Amino acid sequence: MKVNKDLQEQREFDKTDFTQADEKAYEILFKELSKEDELVINPEFAPGVIARINKKRRREQIKENFLFASAIILVIAITIAGLQFSKSILDTQQTLFSNKLVLPLLSMISMIVVFQVLDKMYIRNRKFRRLKEWRS
Amino acid sequence: MDDQSLVRNILNGNTQAFSFLIRKYEKLVFHMINKLVDNDQIIEELAQDVFMKVHEKLPGFRFESKLSTWIGTIAYRHTINHLRKNKKMVFKEIEEDMEENYFKDEYTPAQSIESKDVSHFIKEHINLLPAHYRNILYLYHIEEMSYPEIVEVTQLPVGTVKNYLFRARKLLKDQLSNFMLKEELL
């Protein structure tokens, strides 16, 4: 029984033999200690927490959309810059036939790499998580 | 609903399930914070923060301990951090020679005779104990946590946990014995 175990442990700690009065006092004490205090919790507490979670989720969604839009703008900007750079090189070095193919190709590859990195770092996991939440 | 299905439902985005979890464990969280903080408004704010953290960290919960122990740990640490940040709690070993002062200033013999009953008398004396004592008494006697679980929640060594528990009970028992003796004399 838990009371006996508690009494035994307490006896070992107190390092004294309990009198009957001690034992009675401890028994009363253990009984009282296992009674829970009354606690009034606002009934709106749980809905309040849920509202805070939804608000946080909305904020995160806005942030994700902003990052997604920024990533697309950045990719477009890099592509345009890459194309302009390759055009300027092609204008000055007419003999380099291969540049007509290589430079636009490099721009495209760098664009894809930048997009993949941004997508993996900031977007994909969260988008999938949100999609999963939405589906359920 | 058992805790595993509850967590699974929450992780699948079920808001109702999280609402259920809050209702299931709000008493534990409020009691734990209540043992360390005495301002009702701050208690509610801290409890809200605790459940926000629970929601945030739930995907990483692997059922290596009971859900109640895990939530209790978050509640305890968050409250302690709050108190540390606001410099309202000084962490030091509770000295035994200070113990006789716990009941000295705030509870006079006259008041103790006026106490309505044993239950009331004990409750008032528990409130005069240091926060760590109160908390460990609560976790052991009300939440019925084992020593390892209390160690996990409070991050105190098992020896300290036992020491605080036994010392708190001895202090209360001594006061109770005096009270009962007076009752018999009256």
Image (cartoon, rainbow, N blue to C red):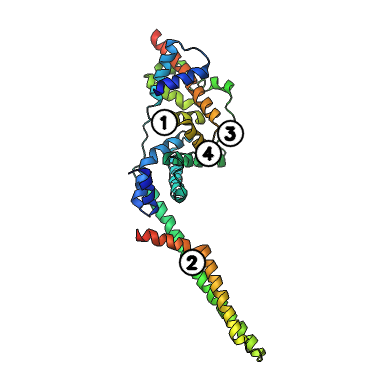
Q: As rendered, which of B182 and B172 lies closer to the eye? A: B172
Q: With B10 as the anchor, is B78 left or right in this view?
A: right
- For mark 1, give the secondary structure: loop
Distance from disc 2 to disc 1, alpha carbons, whole Å, reads 49 Å
The disc, 4 or 3, on the residue closer to the chain's N-terminal end is 4
- For mark 4, give the secondary structure: helix
Residue at (51% x, 18% y) in the render: A12
The image shows residue A126, relative to residue B72, as above or below, that is below
Label 3: how many residues lie within 10 Å, few (<14), some (14-19) or many (20+)?
Answer: few
Let me know if residue A35 appears in the view: yes
- For mark 2, give the secondary structure: helix
Q: As rendered, which of A100 and B23 lies closer to the eye? A: A100
Residue at (55% x, 75% y) in the render: A111
The disc, 1 or 4, on the residue closer to the chain's N-terminal end is 4
Protein chain holding label 1: B
In this rendering, which labeled residue sits more in front, label 2 or label 1? Answer: 1
Distance from disc 3 to disc 2, alpha carbons, whole Å, reads 44 Å
Disc 1 + disc 3, Cβ < 8 Å: no
What amino acid does circle 2 point to?
A: Phe
Measuring from the top left, give residue B89's x and y in whole percent. Answer: 56, 35
**What residue did someone put label 4 on?**
B80
Distance from disc 1 to disc 4, alpha carbons, whole Å, reads 22 Å
Label 2: how many residues lie within 10 Å, few (<14), some (14-19) or many (20+)?
Answer: few
What amino acid does circle 4 point to?
A: Ile
**What residue did someone put label 2 on?**
A66
Q: Quadrant of the C terminus of chain A?
A: bottom left
**What residue did someone put label 1 on?**
B144
Q: Quadrant of the N terminus of chain A?
A: top left
**What residue did someone put label 3 on?**
B91
Disc 2 + disc 4, Cβ < 8 Å: no
